[in-house]
Structures are given as structure tokens and as C-alpha cells.
Image: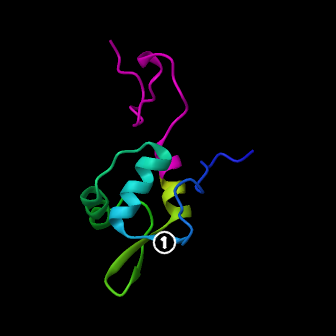
Amino acid sequence: MNLLPETSKFVNPTYRPRLRRWDAAKYLGDVHGIQIAAATLAKLASIGGGPAITYFSKIPLYALSDLDAWALSKLHAPIWSTAETLVPYDLGDDPEP
């Protein structure tokens, strides 16, 4: 079972295995429904936490497989109530009353 979305809808006849930052942001929105600005990808490239990047000289390039992996790592299982949301941090032992 393939969990990755169909990328052929996005890729044009001149297939590009790596995208510039602006196109990477568009790809994430079109394929994964994740609306993210190119500027946010630039900030994540600076501080960490974004998709993997390769460079051609000074030009940042994002591989489609790295964008897919990053998007899937940021999503969690569907929930049916806000009471089911995941706690992102370990809060340790319950405090005593």
C-alpha cells in the first residue's frame, strides 16, 4: 500500500526531480494540502525543522521525495474530537494534589 500521494498530477512533461523553494511551497500545497510560504521554508532552512535541502551553488533545491517525507512526518493520524489531540511533549509524572 502506497501512502504517498500521486505526484504525477503535479509533475509536468518536463519532469523535475528537484524544485526551487517557491515551487516546493506550491508542491506542498497542491499535493499535500499544506499551505506554507516560500519564506517559511527559507526560515526553516535557516533554523532547522524543514525538509532536507540540496544546493546547486547557492540555489536551494528540494527533492520531491524529501518534500513528501517531511510532509508525512508532520501529519498525525486522523482524529474525530479535539479531546483526542496528541500532547507534543512529555509532561512527566502527574503532579501530586
Q: For the stretch drawn in magenta, what is the main secondary structure?
A: loop
Disc 1 marks a residue whose amino acid type is Arg
Question: Which of 32 and 40 lies nearest the eye of the viewer?
Answer: 32
Residue under the image location 54 percent in, 72 percent down: 14
Task: Check the image and tell me how it is coloured.
Answer: rainbow
Question: Which of 84 and 71 lies nearest the eye of the viewer?
Answer: 71
Above or below, comparing residue 68 to residue 58 in the picture: above
Indicate the quadrant containing the C terminus: top left, top right, bottom left or bottom right.
top left
47 relative to 29 in the view: left or right: left
Residue under the image location 40 percent in, 80 percent down: 55
Above or below, comparing residue 47 to residue 31 in the picture: below
Q: Give the residues in magenta.
A: 71-97
Outermost residue on the front side: it is 13
Above or below, comparing residue 6 to residue 92 in the picture: below
Residue 12 position within the rendered picture, expressed as x and y whole percent measured from the top left:
53, 64
Above or below, comparing residue 59 to residue 64 in the picture: below
Q: Quadrant of residue 39 in the image?
A: bottom left
Q: Which residue is mark 1?
A: 18
The crowding category of the residue bearing disc 1, from other C-alpha atoms within 10 Å (few below 14, some 14 to 19, many at least 20), is some
Q: Is residue 36 magenta?
A: no
Indicate the quadrant containing the N terminus: top left, top right, bottom left or bottom right.
top right
Q: Is residue 86 magenta?
A: yes
Outermost residue on the right side: it is 1
